[in-house]
Image (cartoon, helix red, strand yellow):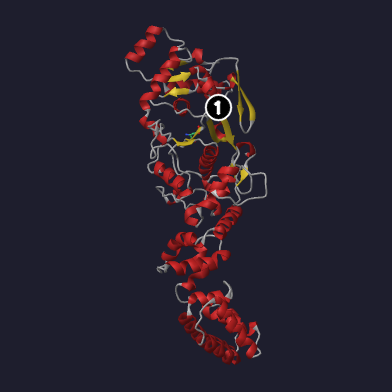
Amino acid sequence: MAHTRVRFAPSPTGPLHIGGLRTALYNYLFARQTGGTFILRIEDTDQTRYVPGAEQYILESLAWAGIQPDEGPRAGGDYAPYRQSERKHIYRKYAEQLIASGHAYYAFDTPQELEARREQARQAGNHNFKYDSSVRLEMRNSLTLPAEEVARLIESGAPYVVRLKVPRGEMITFRDRIRGEVQFHSEELDDKVLLKSDGMPTYHLANVVDDYLMKITHVIRGEEWLPSTGHHVLLYRAFGWTLHMPEFAHLPLILKPNGKGKLSKRDGVRLGIPVFPLAWQGDTPEDSFAGFREFGFLPEAVVNFLAFLGWNPGTDQEVFTLDELCRAFSLDKVSKGGARFDFDKARWFNQQHILRMDSRELARRVRPWIEKYGPQPDEDYLVAFCELMKERVTLLPDFWTEGYYFFVPVQQYDEAAIKKRWKPERRPAMEGLVAALENLTDWTAEAIGQTIKQYLTDHGLKFGDVLPFVRLALAGTMKGPGVNEMIALLGKETTLQRLRAGLDLFDRLVTASVESAD
Ligand code: GLU
């Protein structure tokens, strides 16, 4: 088989939707797996929809997800430039080639004339007027006007577009890698504009010409492009490039969490969930969104989650690294039906990736989420903290909310728990424990555990008599990691200081509540 070349071809019309990132991912996985090349091509020929910053956003999203293009605007490559606006000069020649071979024509119909024609169709009950083979001979174009008139109009600078002359009565059949055989009847297809009056190509022309010139072997893209593929196949035929036609694979839609309809950015706002990889700052607050990154997702987890939106390996394994996905992925296991966006599942993947991540690496990812609040922890301390907390968190900000007390004093005590459990008679037992810990020199979780156990046995106490208070004094809450590990990490000084301060606080709280009850 020829060397595989696939492309991700986004239009910079806004932030990259999570579905776009999935398309990029599937292309990337397919390229890696087949030892091929993954190309990024920016399709920015539609000036009216161009959004500044969107290309930068796309590049950053791919970099964040770890799906780096082998060729593209930044990476360069033998087929540069990879931005269609820098390839403008290429497309006209191809449009003219199609006119010369009788597969396309000039159309001079003005917007007013087209509107009048549309109105006429509406009056006749047709609300879906199409410029196609059934009407083109009634329109003002190079098929109906005498050659001299066409030449004169062009000479005089009259605005025109170039349209594809869709043949009549043909079946257009192609095999989609995911959907099997797909057929269009040429009568269903309109005479698509290929070159616009501003001289810019439309998506259809630029896309096909570039796929051909860049030697693309497989077109893997979203299902919304399936209806355009009939036109694309016709273009390959018209150019005489059928032997170079790529294999098509149209990916299933990503559906709303309730499974009803396509996931939209409005669903993100409505449900308070991210539908973009990174934050996007639009012109208005309504057009600004947090992304998976800002919610505290690891890119590894997002990639894993996205891989499963429309694909599964056919085994029980769910947690995959990007490398593992490259090996396991197969276009043949991509489903036809829409894939439901399940945010809880995304959170689950994040939890799994946090759990599996090497603690030193995890510490690197967690650091900004801690430093945001001021502390600048020592590296080894942060690694030990991550090791201790990773079983207890889902998203990266949870490291702070669940474990801030490892960096700053306790800010909130679970007063209800204290009032319910604390009795001033317990104080001597607690003070004895503080003293036992004070004598300990080997400050490891193991030695701490033994010291506590020994102390309890010696004094005929149960774990429940003291440990809840140790937790409450050290962390303000009954939740958290194992108490021995907690004490070890906090260090001797902080532990003893918090235990002593805790006892005073407990007494105060309980006395205060007794007084207020009086
Ligand atoms: N520029 C199109 C988009 O924005 C590309 C579709 C395709 O991959 O052919 O998605």
Q: Is residue 141 above or below residue 413?
A: above
Residue 423: x, y in percent?
A: 60, 89
**Quadrant of the image for the N terminus?**
top right
Asked whether the viewer can see residue 442, the reply is: yes
Asked whether the viewer can see residue 335, the reply is: no
The image quadrant that residue 344 belongs to is bottom right
**Farthest residue toward the left?**
156
Residue 206: x, y in percent?
A: 44, 27
Residue 504: x, y in percent?
A: 51, 88
Q: Is residue 261 above or below residue 209?
A: below
Residue at 35% across / 25% down in the picture? 89
Q: Is residue 497 above or below residue 280?
A: below
Residue 249: x, y in percent?
A: 58, 33
Asked whether, in this view, residue 471 is left or right of residue 158, the answer is right
Residue at 64% across / 44% down in the picture? 313
The residue wearing badge 1 is 229
In depth, the one of 72 and 408 nearer the eye is 72
Q: Is residue 110 above or below residue 143?
A: below
Asked whether, in this view, residue 390 is left or right of residue 9, the answer is right
Neighbour tally class for label 1: few under 14, some 14-19, many 20 plus, Cα within 10 Å: many
**Farthest residue toward the front?**
442
**Quadrant of the image for the C terminus?**
bottom right
Q: Amino acid at mark 1?
A: Thr
